[in-house]
Amino acid sequence: MGIDVTDMTFEKEVIKRSAEIPVLVDFWASWCGPCVMLKPILERIAKEYKGKFVLAKMSVEENQETPGKFSVMSIPAVKLFKDGLVVDEFVGAKPEAAVRDWLDERL
């Protein structure tokens, strides 16, 4: 669930798409335990909220330019884009209820 984005596709898949629908970007790495815990939560919520937002996932191992551009210092880093801009973000794994509450306040 969700789309994988890269430094090459970020502009189209996140920045431009966020003009039409909010895009939630999960910056993650395979070696990051909290990232592995958060991923299925975000995927489940994206499936349930079908049409309210797009879930985009970006590996910081394979892509360094975009995470640097958006000041990703710790992972998992989750950023919500609307109209090409980050409107809010959180760092670290959150329980599913907390992620839902966070999203509900922003969508």
Image (cartoon, rainbow, N blue to C red):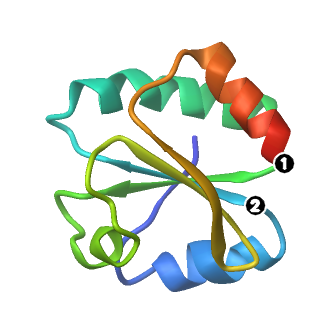
Q: Is 15 located above or below residue 92 in the figure? A: below
Which kind of residue does numbered mark 2 sit on?
Pro
**Residue hosting label 2:** 22
Q: Which mark is residue 2?
A: none
Q: Is 103 located above or below residue 18 in the figure? A: above
Q: Position of residue 54 (x, y in %)?
A: 69, 54
Quarter where residue 22 is shown: bottom right
**Residue hosting label 1:** 107
Q: Position of residue 2 (x, y in %)?
A: 57, 48
- Spatial CA distance of label 2 from label 1 is 7 Å
Horizontally, residue 33 falls left or right of residue 46, namely left
**In this orientation, which residue lies closer to the viewer: 71 or 24?**
71
Q: Is 99 located above or below residue 82 in the figure? A: above
Which kind of residue does numbered mark 1 sit on?
Leu
**In this orientation, which residue lies closer to the viewer: 7 or 66?**
66
> Crowdedness of circle 2 by 10 Å Cα count: few (<14), some, many (20+)?
many
Q: Secondary structure at mark 1?
A: loop
Q: Dots 2 and 1: beta carbons under 8 Å?
A: yes
Horizontally, residue 2 falls left or right of residue 71, namely right
- Of the 4 image quadrants, the one containing the N terminus is top right
Q: Earlier in the sequence, mark 2 or mark 1?
A: 2
Q: Position of residue 92 (x, y in %)?
A: 39, 33
Residue name at image x 36 percent, y 71 percent: 6
